[in-house]
Amino acid sequence: MRREPSHPRGIYLALVALLFLVLPVVLFWRPGHYFFMEDDWPLLAQLVSHSFWQFLAMPDGEVWMPLSRAVYYGLAHTFGEGYSTLLLINCLLSGVLAFQFYLFLRQHFPPVAALVLGLFYGGAAAHTSLTDVAFYNNALLCFNLFLLALLLTRHYLDTSSRAALAGISLCVWLSLVSWNFTLLAVWSLPLYIAILGGKEQRRRFWAVSAAVGLAFLAFSLGYFHYAGFAATSYTNRGIWEGLPGPLYLVHWFVGAFLSPFMYLFWGHYHFPVWAHIAGAAALVLSVALIWRRGNVKEKRLGLWALIFNALPIFLVSLARYQRGVNQAFAPRYAVYTLMGTLLLLGAAWSILQRQMRSSTVVRLLPLAVLAVMVGGQICSLPHWERLYGRMSRASRNFYQHLDQVAASAPGGAQAQVPPEFWYPERLHLTWGEAVNIRRFLAGSGEASREQSHR
């Protein structure tokens, strides 16, 4: 296990960066195959029903994310019906995320191990839950900005740079206004200093805590001004009326630890039985190896990786546990928690390799496990393509025939469109809104005039 950060040469780093950018495009981008679906439609309905500034400031359920809304508006306004271009941008953002994670892995593992873990993360099929739906630019922006804050935290640990400290605060705030998933996760940044830096880094711990706290306070003021306290209970009514029960803890444990280990072996949330067994075994064995055989650095990294996964799911589970434990397997959360999981897996493998260096089994075991993991990712990709392909075909058919269907719809422009390819509890779309969405995406002058008059 590496003790000192590594600085690859510029050309090598550029080639690796290119590899990380290309990987998700090759694996996940299907030009012309997908169309606006799922949460795209509620966002587009709000976009055409409000002024630009109202659209930015309003909450999306319990979430307040003005930055990613601004990005989505700009992309939709620029590319319109070119949904494939929006998804290409998501794929590139996914590649940047994986490359940043690779840079972080370089601080803790040898170059080859870091590259293998990073590439596996970048090619994990769970990423399709973000790259195949344009709406999820919010999660990709959130995760990318958080990873940048983490890299700056590591840099600050080594240098005490004031510029890095300011960058941490800015990136944390931008991450939070992109998507609120990292609301508790950002506190893993000062904990990284406290756990990995040791007692001698106490002053840097307080400095990073203050930087994160400032960004946290700025976000909180904006959230409660524009969304309000009532938004926090949008999904689960009565969430603040009593303490959550055992189901909450089960939801949290599954989402933070068990679910991401299963995603190592199968990249879709409908896991086969063997993936359940393999994931649970990998979790137990990894934690046991780190706890029983790891050195001080490895134990500290393992502890921080567990905290890294646990913190955001505390909040997610609070908002979702009433809907059942299946919500804990949401792949958009696994895209984040896979990072902590791979840190645990990498630390466990380093320990095993050190303990049994001369064993033939140890030399072959990682290749066998990696083959199973990669095979599970590849075999699960068709499940995503069928799921999103079905919704996209229904959405495209609706969109292409919208004008003639809307003209003959009973009830006029205010009548609701029957849900076919979205979640009915998330959207109550009227025929008038649907027509305005088409005008906006098509870039008609009439749509532009209507927007400017609101």
Image (spheres, rainbow, N blue to C red):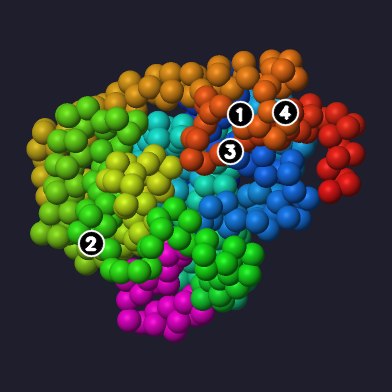
Give the mark nearer the N terminus: 3 vs 2: 2
Q: CA distance from mark 4 to mark 3?
A: 15 Å
Q: Nearer the viewer, mark 1 or mark 4?
A: 4
Q: 10 Å neighbourhood of mark 3: few (<14), some, or many (≥20)?
A: some
Q: Point out residue 22 in the picture as x, y percentages from the top left corner.
A: 55, 30
Say which element carries label 1: loop
Q: Is residue 241 left or right of residue 223?
A: left
Distance from Cα at disc 3 to Cα at disc 2: 32 Å
As shown in the figure, which amino acid type bears the numbered disc 1?
Val
The image's mark for residue 412 is 4
Q: Secondary structure at mark 2?
A: loop
Q: Which residue was labeled with disc 2?
A: 245
Identify which amino acid the numbered label 3 is placed on. Answer: His
The amino acid at mark 4 is Gly
Examine the rendered structure and indicate whether residue 395 appears above or below residue 131.
above
Earlier along the polypeptide chain: callout 2 or callout 1? Answer: 2
Which numbered disc flags the more N-terminal residue, 4 or 3? 4
Residue 302, given in percent of the width and then of the height, sits at 26, 59
Q: Residue furthest front?
A: 411
Please tell me which of labels 4 and 2 falls first in the chain.
2
Distance, label 4 to label 2, CA atoms, is 47 Å
Q: Which residues are magenta?
A: 183-211
Question: In front: 371, or 271?
Answer: 271
Give the residue pinned by disc 3: 428
Q: Is residue 298 left or right of residue 425?
A: left
| Separation of residues labelled 1 and 3 (CA atoms) | 7 Å
